[in-house]
Image: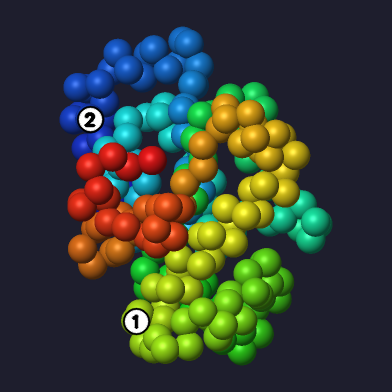
Amino acid sequence: MQRLVEGIHHFRENYFAENQSLFEHLARDGQTPETLFITCSDSRVVPNLITSAAPGELFIVRNVGNIVPSVARGMIGGVAAAIEYAVQVLNVENIVICGHTQCGAIDAILDPSRVRHLDFVSRWLSESEVIPNLLRDKYAHLEGEARLVAAAEENVLVQLENLRSYPFISSRLDAGTLKVAGWVFKIATAQVFGYDPVVQQFVSFASSPAPP
Ligand SMILES: [Zn+2]
């Protein structure tokens, strides 16, 4: 804990001192984030760091497995409330769902026996129970790390689909007033891969100069 307290001092003496007017502006005028960023709770994924986003730019929802509960399945709670607030009140222009490599939730989705003793985790991850079947159908040739990456990618795509189950999102997507994107963050290299619906693959932003 002492490490965190020292970090607070460091933050105030450095970042805050250099950006004090930004914080005063945000306190005075409120937040107008352009993007709702939905990602995993994993400590290795740091949204503001990997996107170089300043305070006030990202409205962030984090949970185990970057899951968006579908309205139809009825597991409505804090995630749905945050999505509704971001879209209906803050009028975000973008929603990014960002999965990542080495995700413990993906391991558990592929092998539910790992978390059978964890009542809440196993119920939560059941939102992604279609993933093992998807892997069997589409990626039977993959194994090891490649299979896990494919699972992380498919999990992001399932959550993008689940976003559409919220009427206030599907109507904005149809009207063209909201954009959604699926990303996967590769921890070891800090690369971000974005889903390209034209080629139906995740493509590294390093080789793609115009991310969505
Ligand atoms: Zn994760």
Foreground: 51 or 23? 51
Foreground: 26 or 83? 83
Q: Tell me the CA gap for discs 1 and 2.
A: 37 Å
**Label 1 element class:** helix
Residue located 54% across and 29% down the image: 92
Q: Is residue 205 above or below residue 170?
A: below
Number of the label disc, if any, that sits on residue 145: 1
- Residue 111 percent location from the top left of the image: 56, 86
Q: Is residue 12 left or right of residue 88?
A: left
Label 2 sits on residue = 15
**Label 2 element class:** helix
- Residue 128 percent location from the top left of the image: 63, 69
**Amino acid found under the numbered disc labelled 2:** Tyr
Q: Earlier in the sequence, mark 1 or mark 2?
A: 2
Foreground: 180 or 38? 180
**Amino acid found under the numbered disc labelled 1:** Glu
- Residue 75 percent location from the top left of the image: 76, 58
